[in-house]
Amino acid sequence: MMLAMASSERSATKASGRLGRALLRLLMKRAAVVAVERLADRFRLITLEGAALAGVTWTPGQKIQIAMGSAFVARTYTPITWDADAGRTCVLGCVHGNGPGSAWVGWVEPGDECHIFGPRTSLDARRLAGSLAVFGDETSIGLAAALAVQDKTRSITCHFEVADVESGRKVVQQLGFDNAVLFAKRADDAHLQEMEAALPALVAAGASFVLTGKAGTIQRLRRSLRQQAVAAPRIVTKAYWAPGKTGLD
Ligand SMILES: Cc1cc2nc3c(=O)[nH]c(=O)nc-3n(C[C@H](O)[C@H](O)[C@H](O)COP(=O)(O)OP(=O)(O)OC[C@H]3O[C@@H](n4cnc5c(N)ncnc54)[C@H](O)[C@@H]3O)c2cc1C
């Protein structure tokens, strides 16, 4: 009985493996990894290229999903640039643990192949007026870089909670955000008070707010902004991950 179950489970896994691979070819864009730059310990700037990426319309803030070996397992990343003529895009990946996304970011090399879905709508900052205040974490740095590409004349200030300030500093500097304010993450979230303390000056200056990254931090900062009477149209949010949840989209 045990053997019979194991064999039927194996066939189901094989079938879903075959289906997953067929869906990859059918629904997703094939790309080659052409460069992997190690910006700091846990950060990789990954460039993808392929004919399927050419002629694509992309708006900064959109997402792509990268298949992790099967169309059924994908992780979401934010293109920083998209060259539709060359069929090339790049993402900043952060290794934070042992999930499939972190593992891929950690081991991927030039010459590897991958499949992507998108770009698709995620966060649209085009309707926001004035200067932008971007709050987030390691996963939000790519978005800030994409928004800087969108409008080079727009002022963008960045505030990121990071596990390692030294690595975070190296990354933001290489992406041109020398003035980014970095907050060392603390297990008791005490650093969130410091992040909140940065809000009133930005509110007074008339900034619009882009909140991404960890769901709990977004909720807290949004509440604080609403208490400061910041109107909803001046805030856009998108949770990029939440403790205990996998593969948020
Ligand atoms: C729209 C969108 C855009 C995104 N853009 C980027 C991007 O440009 N660059 C980037 O690096 N990430 C980005 N992310 C976040 C990334 O998709 C997640 O961090 C994803 O969970 C990573 O997959 P994983 O397989 O490593 O972990 P999962 O298998 O998804 O999760 C395993 C565990 O790790 C936890 N976890 C997930 N992310 C983090 C984290 N950052 N820090 C600590 N714990 C975490 C989960 O809660 C879970 O408990 C984006 C997410 C979304 C929804």
Image: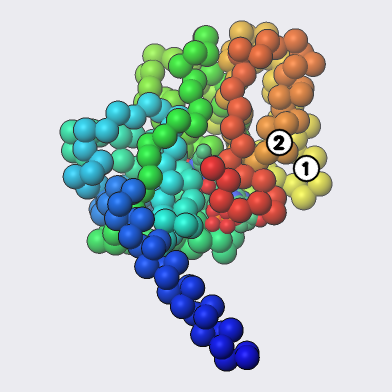
The residue lying toward the viewer, choosing from 165 and 93, is 93
* Crowd tier of the residue under label 1, counting other residues whose Cα lies within 10 Å: few below 14, some 14–19, many 20 or above: few
**In this view of the protein, can residue 170 be seen by the observer?**
no
User: What's the residue at 46%, 44% (across, down)?
Assistant: 77
In the displayed structure, 89 sits above or below 232; it is: below
Indicate which disc residue 73 carries.
Answer: none
Instruction: Indicate the amino acid at tag 1.
Output: Asp
Classify mark 2: helix, strand or loop: helix
Contact? badges 2 and 1 (CB < 8 Å): yes
User: What's the residue at 79%, 16% (across, down)?
Assistant: 227
In the displayed structure, 88 sits above or below 25; it is: above
Between the C-alphas of marks 2 and 1, the distance is: 9 Å
Residue 89 location, quadrant: top left
What residue does disc 2 label? 217
Tag nearer the camera, 2 or 1: 2
In the displayed structure, 204 sits above or below 24; it is: above
What residue does disc 1 label? 189
Locate residue 99, reporting x and y percent.
56, 61
Locate residue 71, reporting x and y percent.
42, 56
